[in-house]
């Protein structure tokens, strides 16, 4: 089996505006973007940039780019001086790499996409309006880790090294993240052995093999600081990467990306590759489910009717649904005769292809439109106001 690794790098002169957790801006003017490809799959993205000593002081104080004190190594040759810029090399958190790769396949496209996002960042309002449902909610840019704009968050990048060129030579330090194999950070080879080896090498260089009580305390803090991230990576990749990963994002990630970009509020269903969402149309509000079937390369979207059909009305509603389904092009209604649940399903099989936002959008909005259109008829049949035939005739007139 081949194990070809290639690096693609692009240096740009231009303003790239990042934001910290409080949404304060941080602008860099010169940066280098590089992608690493292994066996034709992009496995990581590096962003290297220079900042003034004054700006580095802010980064240092606020521990931006995950520069927590406990994961930093020692300065190699004295303190930083206020006379020259400081270079910081970072790597994108692996769970955000699919967001970038949905819009870029090489370093040129990745840099262009980040610059475009930087220029088009939305105003940071306290609330935003969902045009589809008319509901208002808090702006999701600060806290939603799956928003495209999260690529511009300082917390989405792990600092690998911090360096400064001085007259006497170079000084700087490496962080714990630079000791971790990039393939492990991208989800390949992620294991306790990898973590243990990385920690051992980090502390070996930090203390030259001597573990004092202070160093042991620092080791505990460092382990605690990185264990949460590795836990997130383990959960993410166990759910969303297929057995034979490719450069194309997995189906579940494509679903998450779409609903994030389309401004839907959702929650992940524990233990499943599914999302729970809500939609409000002209005729009612109901729950929806978006489900990924990774092995089968399928995506299914369900609208759950807010009306449960009582047992005496299920035969009539069954007739209504049969009449409604006749001639349906995209999707169909389903009735569970056991509990009276009605749902509308749209689905697609993308084996041999990829699930795009355009395909998801078509299935989702075709789905909720049909539920909203037929909901008054379902209600009329359940309440005995119309026969199934008359209810369908009224809707489809």
Image: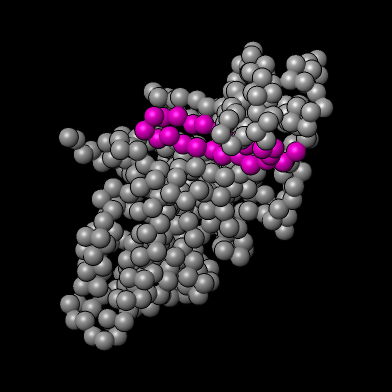
Answer whether residue 285 is magenta in the image.
yes
User: Quadrant of residue 227 in the image?
Assistant: bottom left
Magenta residues (range): 284-309
- Identified at 61% across, 16% down, the residue is 329
User: Quadrant of residue 340 in the image?
Assistant: top right
| Residue 186 place in picture, x, y as percent | 34, 49
Image quadrant where one finds the N terminus:
top left
Q: Nearer the viewer, residue 351 or 229?
A: 351
Residue 49 against residue 45 in the figure, above or below: below
Q: Nearer the viewer, residue 73 or 392?
A: 392
Residue 137 against residue 299 in the figure, above or below: below
| Residue 396 place in picture, x, y as percent | 77, 17
Q: Is residue 191 visible?
A: yes
Residue furthest out toward the bottom:
213
User: Quadrant of residue 191 in the image?
Assistant: bottom left
- Identified at 48% across, 56% down, the residue is 156
167 on left or right of 26:
left
143 on left or right of 162:
right
């Amino acid at each position: 089996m081949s194990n070809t690794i290639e690096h693609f790098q692009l240096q740009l002169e231009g303003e790239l505006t990042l934001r910290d957790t409080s949404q304060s801006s941080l602008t860099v003017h010169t940066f280098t973007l590089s992608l690493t490809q292994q066996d034709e799959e992009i496995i990581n993205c590096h962003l290297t940039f220079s900042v003034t000593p004054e700006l580095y002081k802010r980064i240092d104080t606020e521990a931006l780019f995950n520069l927590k004190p406990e994961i930093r190594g020692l300065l190699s040759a004295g303190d930083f001086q206020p006379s020259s810029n400081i270079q910081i090399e970072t790597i994108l958190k692996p769970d955000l790499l699919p967001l970038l790769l949905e819009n870029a396949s090489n370093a040129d496209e990745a840099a262009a996409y980040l610059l475009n996002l930087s220029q088009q960042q939305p105003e940071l309002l306290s609330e935003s309006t969902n045009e589809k449902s008319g509901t208002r909610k808090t702006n999701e840019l600060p806290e939603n880790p799956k928003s495209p704009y999260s690529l511009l968050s300082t917390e989405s990048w792990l600092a690998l090294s911090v360096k400064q060129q001085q007259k006497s030579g170079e000084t700087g330090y490496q962080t714990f993240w630079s000791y971790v194999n990039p393939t492990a950070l991208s989800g390949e080879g992620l294991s306790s052995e990898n973590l243990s080896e990385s920690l051992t090498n980090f502390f070996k260089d930090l203390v030259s093999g001597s573990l004092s009580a202070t160093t042991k305390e620092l080791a505990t803090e460092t382990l605690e600081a990185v264990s949460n991230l590795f836990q997130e990576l383990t959960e993410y990749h166990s759910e969303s990467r297929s057995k034979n990963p490719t450069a194309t994002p997995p189906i579940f990630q494509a679903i998450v990306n779409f609903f994030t970009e389309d401004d839907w509020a959702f929650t992940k269903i524990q233990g499943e590759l599914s999302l729970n969402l809500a939609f409000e149309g002209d005729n009612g509000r109901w729950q929806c489910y978006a489900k990924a079937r990774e092995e089968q390369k399928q995506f299914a979207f369900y609208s759950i009717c807010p009306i449960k059909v009582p047992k005496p009305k299920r035969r009539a509603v069954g007739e209504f649904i049969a009449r409604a389904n006749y001639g349906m092009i995209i999707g169909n209604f389903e009735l569970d005769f056991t509990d009276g649940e009605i749902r509308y399903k749209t689905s697609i099989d993308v084996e041999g292809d990829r699930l795009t936002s355009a395909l998801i959008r078509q299935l989702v909005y075709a789905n909720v439109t049909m539920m909203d259109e037929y909901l008054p008829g379902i209600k009329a049949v359940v309440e005995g106001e119309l026969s199934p035939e008359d209810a369908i005739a009224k809707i489809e007139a």
